[in-house]
Image (cartoon, helix red, strand yellow):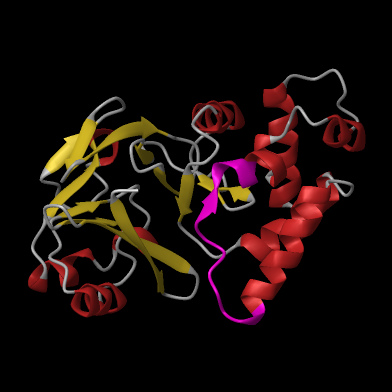
Amino acid sequence: MSFELITIPCLSDNYAFLAHDAADGKTLLVDVPEAAPISEALYKKGWRLTDILLTHHHQDHVDGLAELLKSHPARVIGAKADQNRLPPLDEAVVEGDIITVGSNNGLVIDVSGHTIGHIAIHFSNSKLLFTADSLMALGCGRLFEGDPDQMWGSLSKLATLDPDTIVCSGHEYTAANGRFAITIEPKNSALQNRIREIAKKRSRNIPTVPSTLREELETNPFLRPDSTEARHNLGMRNNTDAEVFAEIRRRKDNF
């Protein structure tokens, strides 16, 4: 992996990420929940911030930007479709655009659903995927603006990537997501093992993020609407994957 990655806890349960290319000193920040812990991480590593990606407009992902830019000026990148709700951008991107950070080229992916205009970025050579509140550890974002078909389409794009891809999502919701996931697939041994590992990490205040796409494909109910056990438990043996996903999302909203 040509990026060095740092996961930065922010606010009560958010994460920001720093990805540093040592070859030329470029450093990407993904989302800015608050400035202070990010500034501290940059100072400790001696890194110069060069690029900031905003995945979507929600305040807990952008509120620290103005303060951070005072001491760490950088190129600010965000979705063209969301630019009227984002802070001022230096570069507005659409799906299929490439964001270059040092020797790393990141593909912009539209993952609308949680919000309209939410983007993810995939650095294939580093096997890094920044998903914020679209695909999450053992979950997916609540559908504040999009609909289930849209979110299922977004997640389906991500599910086709290399299973060894590291998934950097935006919140420490994994334990709660696990408590729901086990109601959908109680016999899933990989999920049972993951829940135990999550409990160990959280007891030591260790982040459960990032995860791998392989873990998500094996345990995340929102990527598993084709699971025979899930379909049996939901009484949806003959429904489409999109319909099963919609029911899982509905149940999670009411869990």
Image coords of residue 178 (percent x, y): 72, 58
Q: Is residue 210 magenta?
A: yes
Image coords of residue 167 (percent x, y): 48, 48
User: Measuring 50% from the left and 70% from the top, which residue is drawn there?
Assistant: 13
Residue 133 visible to an observer of this rendering: no
Q: Quadrant of the C terminus?
A: bottom right
Query: Would you say 148 lies left or right of 162 here?
Result: right
Query: Would you say 113 lies left or right of 29 here?
Result: right
Closer to the camera in the image, 4 or 221: 4
Image coords of residue 234 (percent x, y): 87, 35
Residue 232 visible to an observer of this rendering: yes
- Name above or below for residue 72 compared with residue 2: below
Query: Would you say 57 lies left or right of 236 here?
Result: left
User: Measuring 34% from the left and 47% from the top, which residue is drawn there?
Assistant: 55
User: Measuring 22% from the left and 74% from the top, which residue is drawn there?
Assistant: 45
- Name above or below for residue 202 compared with residue 239: below
Image mark count? 0
Which residues fall within the magenta stretch? 203-216
Closer to the camera in the image, 238 or 254: 238
Q: Is residue 44 magenta?
A: no
User: Measuring 41% from the left and 43% from the top, which residue is drawn there?
Assistant: 129
Image coords of residue 21 (percent x, y): 21, 53
- Name above or below for residue 41 compared with residue 124: below
Query: Would you say 115 lies left or right of 17 here?
Result: right
